[in-house]
């Protein structure tokens, strides 16, 4: 039986999702229900860090931190998994205040019983720095504040230098790894099918950069053909632009949901 017309508003729209597979599948299912022709093409793989030492050390000192900052749901997942493996008491996480970059990260924390006390209006590291500074009536009050930032080995180092200027002590530890998948150029081009119209969704600069490395090019525009690139935020869009891609619009706020809304609006036209 055919689905109601309302659910088929993306019928015939081809969409390639480049997120890690476990992240991509729920979105793929949602887009498929809307009638889109979806292909999952993971350009990053997520796993544990190569060395647990720095993370374990930070966890053993968790009560000495005033803030925990999480910039992704992956950071939440892998940090708490290791925290539990080390026999940590979740009540110890009630002492530091918790900041999250974006609602998805915030929901990941709240599902695990942790209270988010700060979330910036825009879902970027730069916006979080601004929100963090606004927390203090006098920026000098930040002097000596201890911050733990579980992240990946390739996370942009934006928050630490910005807060260090005000005397905060920011410790970044690898909670997970973000690596490039193994695939050949020919197989990749078959999966992309650049001769056909459609969208390719990028949710991180690493996905954009990994695609260029896998294809062995410095200009992705010539490789993607009729595929139109859409990016989740300005940092990802900058990476795409450096590699020759034209980005016509950014979602507001910076989220996958807003990005899908752009596609739906264009499909209506």
Image (cartoon, grey):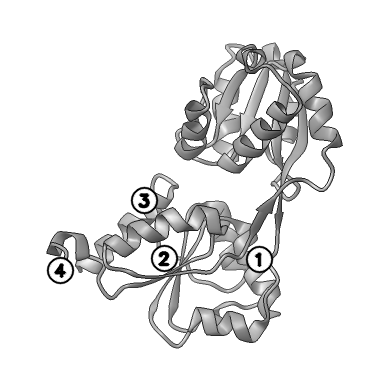
For residue 258, the mark is: 3
Name which of mark 1 and mark 3 comes first in the sequence: 1
Secondary structure category for the residue under label 1: helix
Residue at 50% in and 52% down: 233
Cβ atoms under marks 3 and 2 closer than 8 Å:
no
Q: Residue 234: image x %, image y %? A: 52, 53
Q: Which residue is mark 4?
A: 2
**Label 1 to label 3, Cα distance in Å?**
23 Å
Which is more foreground, mark 2 or mark 1? 1
Q: Residue 230: name its quadrant.
A: bottom left
Determine which residue is flagged by label 1. 209
Q: Earlier in the sequence, mark 3 or mark 2?
A: 2
Q: Quadrant location of the N terminus?
A: bottom left
Of mark 3 and mark 4, the one earlier in the sequence is 4
For disc 2, the marked residue is 248
Question: For mark 1, does the 10 Å Cα neighbourhood hold few (<14), some (14 to 19), or many (20 or more) residues?
Answer: many
Counting residues from the start of the chain, the first of labels 4 and 1 encountered is 4
Question: How far apart in space, not on screen, are marks 4 and 1 (Cα)?
Answer: 40 Å
User: How packed is label 3: few (under 14 Cα within 10 Å), some, or many (20 or more)?
Assistant: some
């Amino acid at each position: 039986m055919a689905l109601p017309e309302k659910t088929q508003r993306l019928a015939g729209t081809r969409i390639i999702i480049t997120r890690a597979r476990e992240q991509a599948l729920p979105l793929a299912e949602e887009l498929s229900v809307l009638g889109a022709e979806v292909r999952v093409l993971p350009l990053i793989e997520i796993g544990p860090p190569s060395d647990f030492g720095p993370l374990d050390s930070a966890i053993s000192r968790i009560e000495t931190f005033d803030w925990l900052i999480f910039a992704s749901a992956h950071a939440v997942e892998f940090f708490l998994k290791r925290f539990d493996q080390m026999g940590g008491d979740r009540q110890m996480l009630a002492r530091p205040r918790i900041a999250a970059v974006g609602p998805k990260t915030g929901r990941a924390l709240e599902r695990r019983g942790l209270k988010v006390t700060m979330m910036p209006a825009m879902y970027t590291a730069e916006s979080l720095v601004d929100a963090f500074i606004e927390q203090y009536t006098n920026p000098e009050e930040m002097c000596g504040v201890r911050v733990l930032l579980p992240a990946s080995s390739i996370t942009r180092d934006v928050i630490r230098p910005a807060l260090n200027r005000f005397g905060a002590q920011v410790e970044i530890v690898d909670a997970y790894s973000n690596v490039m998948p193994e695939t050949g150029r020919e197989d990749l081009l078959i999966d992309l099918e650049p001769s056909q119209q459609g969208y390719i969704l990028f949710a991180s600069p690493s996905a954009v950069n990994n695609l260029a490395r896998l294809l062995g090019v410095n200009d992705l525009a010539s490789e993607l053909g009729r595929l139109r690139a859409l990016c989740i935020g300005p940092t990802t869009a900058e990476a795409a632009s450096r590699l020759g891609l034209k980005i016509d619009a950014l979602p507001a706020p910076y989220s996958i949901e807003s990005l899908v809304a752009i596609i739906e609006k264009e499909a209506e036209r």
